[in-house]
Each structure stands twice: as C-alpha cells, then as structure tokens.
C-alpha cells in the first residue's frame, strides 16, 4: 500500500460525465444495454432453461439486473468496476457497483501485477470490495484511465470545439459588426 498511486479522479469524473452527457456515446450505451438486458435474466441447467422461484426472480430483478447494467457502465466509462458485496437482512449476499467518484481508488503496479485499494473519505479500506479489471482497458501504471470513453475524449473535445467555432462563425456572419455597401460610380457604368 505504501507505493500505491491514486487513480486520476479527473479521468474518472470525465469518463462518467462524457458517457452520460455525450448524446452519441449515451445512445450507443443504451443500444448495448437494450440488446443485452431486454430479456432479463434466465436460469439455465443441464435440461435447458428452468423457471426460478418468485423470490429468486425478485432478487434477480432488484439486484442482479441493475448490477449488470452498472457493471457495463463502469467498464465503458472507466475500464474497470469496483464491486462491493453486501449482506441483506435475510442473509442474502448481493453485489453492487460502487461509483468510483465517491471513493478513493489506489493502484499499486508491481512487475505486471495490479493491486487495488478502495478507501472511503476517512481513508479506511472498504470491506468486501474487489476490483474487476479483466476487460482490456486497465489503467496505466501511473494511474491514468484507458477506458473506451477516455480514449474518445480528445476526438469528442475536438468535435465540440469545431461545432462551437462553426456556431460562433455563423452567428457573427448573421449579425456582422460592420456593414458595407457598394456605391455605383460613373466609371463603373
């Protein structure tokens, strides 16, 4: 833990913000979620699909389906997911995805092995928490994010700047500062 570097919080915030607020990225995310989760979660066994009891189906709908959707969002926006396993009142253990912007994420990279530490705001390690990092978008050794959204950020910023410049140019052209008018001279006739 002594050599652990904090994951860049600006990268984490930008990845989540751009995923939610960029219309193209958000549309792609919604299409992927719709295709993956439109049928819910089914149970399969050796004899094919089986029906779950009502309690288990409720657990799947209330906990596992949101977990899967949040997992997809975390992978798209930050490249990894912080999973915490919580115990319900009835003893059932379910996973939830922690938002990386509300915790402190530390990375210790040692000879190809990544070790993560998740701490709360009081600098205590959060119990029953693991980091899923096998999606191909792992952070760099110095704590910079390499997610799909973060890789698109330079292009998105360029396109936004280009659109803003074009809009400003058109507004100036529609309402010019100086208006000129040509006057006919006898020599022009």
Image: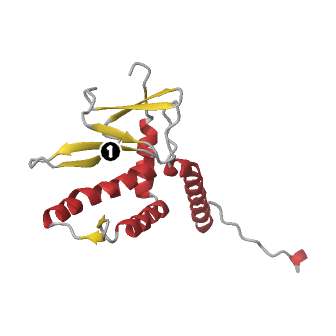
Considering only vertical position in the picture, is 83 above or below 186? above
- Depth check, front residue: 164 or 13: 13
Which residue is most to the bottom? 189
The residue shown at (50%, 36%) is 144
Residue 39 percent location from the top left of the image: 32, 71
Q: Answer with the quarter of the image where residue 31 lies.
A: bottom left
> Horizontally, is 111 left or right of 62 in the view?
right
- Depth check, front residue: 77 or 33: 33
- Depth check, front residue: 47 or 60: 47
> Horizontally, is 85 left or right of 115 in the view?
left
Q: How is the image coloured?
A: secondary structure
Residue 55 percent location from the top left of the image: 14, 62
Crowding around mark 1 (Cα neighbors within 10 Å: few <14, some 14 to 19, many 20+) is some
The residue shown at (31%, 36%) is 103
The residue shown at (49%, 63%) is 24
Quadrant where the N terminus lies? top left
> Horizontally, is 13 left or right of 122 in the view?
right
Residue at mark 1 = 99
Q: Answer with the quarter of the image where residue 47 lies.
A: bottom left
Considering only vertical position in the picture, is 102 above or below 28? above
- Depth check, front residue: 89 or 168: 89
SS at badge 1: loop
> Horizontally, is 112 left or right of 104 in the view?
right
The residue shown at (55%, 52%) is 152
Residue 187 percent location from the top left of the image: 90, 75
Which residue is most to the right? 187
């Amino acid at each position: 833990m002594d050599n652990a570097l904090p994951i860049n919080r600006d990268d984490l915030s930008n990845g989540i913000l751009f995923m939610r607020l960029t219309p193209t990225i958000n549309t792609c995310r919604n299409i992927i979620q719709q295709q993956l989760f439109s049928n819910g979660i089914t149970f399969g066994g050796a004899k094919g699909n089986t029906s779950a009891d009502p309690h288990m189906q409720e657990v799947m709908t209330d906990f596992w389906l949101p977990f899967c959707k949040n997992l997809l969002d975390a992978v798209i926006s930050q490249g990894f997911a912080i999973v915490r396993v919580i115990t319900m009142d009835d003893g059932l253990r379910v996973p939830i995805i922690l938002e990386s912007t509300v915790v402190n994420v530390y990375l210790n990279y040692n000879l190809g092995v990544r070790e993560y530490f998740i701490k709360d705001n009081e600098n205590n390690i959060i119990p029953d928490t693991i980091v899923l990092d096998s999606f191909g978008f792992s952070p760099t050794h110095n704590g910079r994010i390499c997610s799909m959204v973060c890789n698109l950020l330079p292009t998105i910023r360029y396109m936004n700047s280009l659109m803003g410049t074009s809009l400003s140019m058109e507004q100036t052209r529609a309402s010019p500062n100086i208006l000129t008018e040509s006057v006919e001279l006898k020599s022009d006739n």
